[in-house]
């Protein structure tokens, strides 16, 4: 995946914190999910301030549902970035992705295709704008917008 500029990285981190809040909102979180979330936190190079924010607000972190389809699509983009940041896709990452994508209202049967479309774009020589357009068309095709 492409390197992110400072603003994009902040946006991905916000998505990560929201995803973290989603899983922490459950009474019990399976250790395999915690391991996946910790991996992503390390790969995102969370700063001391980021970690202090989490620690200071651990019991106050709240999942905030993205309001519209564009925001939900951005959340999926951020999730894909987290998955592909190390160029390795693990089964548990896909499991977390499926849970989150379904929470965002994406049908489970098309989640894999959506991820494939986003993830293979750099290898297909497509720009971010082209990928966003394709994903938007994909979502319209499956009545997801």
Image (cartoon, rainbow, N blue to C red):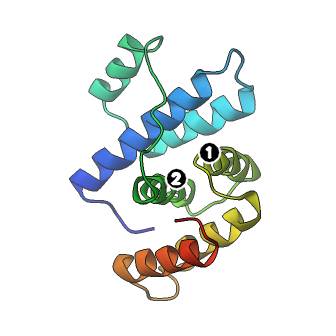
Q: Which mark is residue 13?
A: none
Contact (Cβ within 8 Å) of mark 1 with mark 2: yes
Q: 36 or 118, which lies in front?
A: 118
Q: Which mark is residue 79?
A: 2
Residue 90 in the image, given as x and y percentages of width and height: 71, 54
112 left or right of 101 in image: right
* Front label number (1 vs 2): 1
Seen at 55% across and 60% down, the residue is: 84
Secondary structure beneath dot 2 equals helix
Q: Which residue is mark 1?
A: 100
Q: Can the viewer see residue 114? A: yes
77 relative to 61, above or below: below
Among numbered discs 1 and 2, the one appearing first in the sequence: 2
Residue 40 in the image, given as x and y percentages of width and height: 52, 42
Q: Residues within 10 Å of mark 2 (few under 14, many from 20)?
A: many
Q: For the residues marked 1 and 2, what is the alpha-carbon distance in whole angstroms?
A: 9 Å
Residue 25 in the image, given as x and y percentages of width and height: 59, 21
Seen at 51% across and 56% down, the residue is: 76
Secondary structure beneath dot 1 equals helix
């Amino acid at each position: 995946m492409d390197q992110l500029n400072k603003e994009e990285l902040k946006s991905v981190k916000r998505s990560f914190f929201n995803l973290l809040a989603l899983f922490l909102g459950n009474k019990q979180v399976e250790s395999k999910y915690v391991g996946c979330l910790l991996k992503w936190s390390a790969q995102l190079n969370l700063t001391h301030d980021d970690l202090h924010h989490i620690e200071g607000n651990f019991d106050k972190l709240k999942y905030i549902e993205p309001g519209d389809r564009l925001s939900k699509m951005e959340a999926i983009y951020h999730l894909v970035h987290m998955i592909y940041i190390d160029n390795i896709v693990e089964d548990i990452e896909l499991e977390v992705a499926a849970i989150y994508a379904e929470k965002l209202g994406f049908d489970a049967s098309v989640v894999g295709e959506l991820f494939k479309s986003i993830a293979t774009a750099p290898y297909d020589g497509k720009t971010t704008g082209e990928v966003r357009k394709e994903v938007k068309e994909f979502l319209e095709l499956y009545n997801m917008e």
